[in-house]
Amino acid sequence: MTPNIYSGNIPLDNEKIQLEKEGSKKAQELISLFQSFDAYRKQWEEDAIRNYKLYRGWKEKLNEEQKHRSNLHIPRTYQIVDTIRSRFVNTFFGQRPYIEFTPAPQTMSIENLETAEDKAKVASALVDEQLDKNNIVAKYYDYITQMLIFPSSVMGVGWRYEEKEITRRVPQRETRLNRMGQLYYTGEWNYNIMNSVEAIWDDNEIKNIDFFDFWPDPKGTDLDDCRGVFQREFITYEQLIEKLKFLNSIGLGTVYPVDYEELMETDAHQVGREERMSKIGKSTSMKASYFDSDDSELKAKSKFELLHYWEDDRHAILINRTKCVYDGPSPYWRHHMKPFIVESFDRIPNEFYGLSAIDVFADLQEEENAIHNQRNDNINLVVNKMFKARRGRDIDESDLISQPHGIIWVDQMDDVELMPMDDVASSSFSQQAEVARAAEQSVGATPIVQGAEGRSDKTATEAMELSSNAGQRFSVKTKVMNYKGIKRLAAIMDGNNQQFIAGDRLVRILPEEGRKWRWANPGNLIGEFDYRPAGSALDPTVNKEVQREQLSHMMQFLFEAQIPFIKYHELIKEWINSFDFEHANKFVMSAEEWQAKQQEMQQEAMMQEQQMGAEGRGPQAGQAAAAQEGAARGRRPQSPRNPRRRERGNIR
């Protein structure tokens, strides 16, 4: 094993000493900066732990004297979080394509605008495929969960390139030698096992970053305003070597030499999830299994703590909070942003950390737990009554336990008396319901929004009005999340594609009639775009059923009125998209097919008119021919009706 972690040309002794001094100075600067950032974040850690406990339903164990008391947790927090989380995930990633690109407004000709629109379609399809490759639905689910629990939620977006040796069966034609010594194909196929090194990942990579693994600038009000941020990750020795080799190969910054044995003597700090899990009595720290192993291969799998320091144009790495191993410019020069997305459930103006959803109703959750447990204790005392007994009487405590046909022998009637206990269960039910209602309404997760049955005294109109009001609250938050999260995510991924993709690749475009493949080169991706969610997430009407009903009524009116300047093709597409079908556009003709179909129908109508005109003279001739045919069959010709003549007779 190489004791010196350094990749590239081995420096001379003087150069190495100079690099070590420079690295030591950088490390001290970064450590001092990190301590300031860490002291700032600690102010929110207590609230974050409290919210995590409420979400997990953790309750502190009762001591021996209180073990008979009720100690239940009502899962109101999970119920509310699950409602809001599902709404946000379905809003942004409920249907594909996920994000639409449009050319950014700029001065250009019509020809250039058409080219820019084609580039936007290709760039959007590529980002859509990468989001699906990153399993964005699951990762955004976790991202929203963190946002609802902690003061902020963080997602990292970077570029990952990874090669791996792949073993597969490769078909080869069977060949043989003929009598002349020439090779010929037999027509059969053989399948040989071959190994090859292939790039298994050369795309954007999205990672969720724990609240306890991210430190913002104390003076920053948002991510762009922060002068710098720290982000923590844990990697093995082998991964560290590969990372330093890559950083040295691109030649943008300085890789500082670090002694492996010295690193093994330093302690890697806890992972973010270990910090919070330890507060509920759980731990994933298994340091001794690798760190203290005598096996060199196992010991090489020990993990080191890396603190990445990011600015818009700088990237530095601190290992185990002792040594600086890299310092240089940020590798992401195209988008020129810190490669993160940070959001809070409710923003606080001019503050980096906002409110989580649990912050809003945490006290109400604790109050509901207290009311529920007090009611259980009261019911327990009403059912299992307490007695008072005269001191010194020969009364066995087991006789005081209620049982069928039980007898308590006393000398006097007042030797044992029942302790009176009022039943408060009925009043506590209504009190708990009010507390639960206050918690749900505080964040807009009312029973109607949750899909649960609300109060029975509400009319359908009142229920729809409540649902609409809750939808407006969510609609505002989704618009804020779109600008602070989704647009930044798309901008970073698009910038990385324009910077790192160097060769041609196949992209699956999602046209109206389905999917099709298309070759895209780096030139097809270069451009300036605007980004927005492709679904109906930001429309005022959140309820799809209401939207579908409105579209149906509008279509019925327009078809009956036959208004000529309405785009009926687009209207039908919008109506079909209101259903929860995957790739609903495949049921609708494309605009070109629609126009061709209309032209075909017009041509058929014209041909019919011409045919009728050739046989007679239009519709009148057709009527005359029908009259002649009727007369031939013995029918009496119709006589013109006299409007002054009144018919007589009875109507049956």
Image (spheres, rainbow, N blue to C red):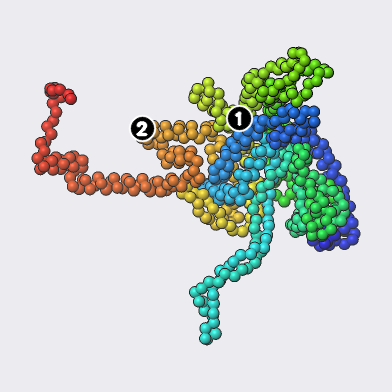
For numbered disc 1, what is the local secondary structure? Answer: loop
Residue in front for this viewpoint, 339 or 258: 258
Label annotation for residue 208:
none
Label annotation for residue 445:
1
| Residue type beneath disc 2 | Ala
Q: Residue at x 64, y 18 (%)?
A: 427
Earlier-in-chain disc, 2 versus 1: 1
Look at the image and tell me in which quarter the N terminus lies: bottom right
For the image shown, how many numbered marks are present on the structure?
2
Question: Which one is in front in this view, the residue at disc 2 or the one at disc 1?
Answer: 1
Residue 9, visible in the rendered structure: yes
Residue 544 position within the rendered picture, expressed as x and y whole percent measured from the top left: 50, 35
Residue 125 position within the rendered picture, expressed as x and y whole percent measured from the top left: 56, 49
Q: Residue at x 60, y 34 (%)?
A: 83
Residue in front for this viewpoint, 33 or 468: 468
Q: Residue at x 76, y 13 (%)?
A: 412
Residue 248 in which image quadrant: bottom right
Label annotation for residue 561:
2
Query: Left or right: where does residue 439 sit relative to residue 297?
Result: left
| Residue type beneath disc 1 | Ala
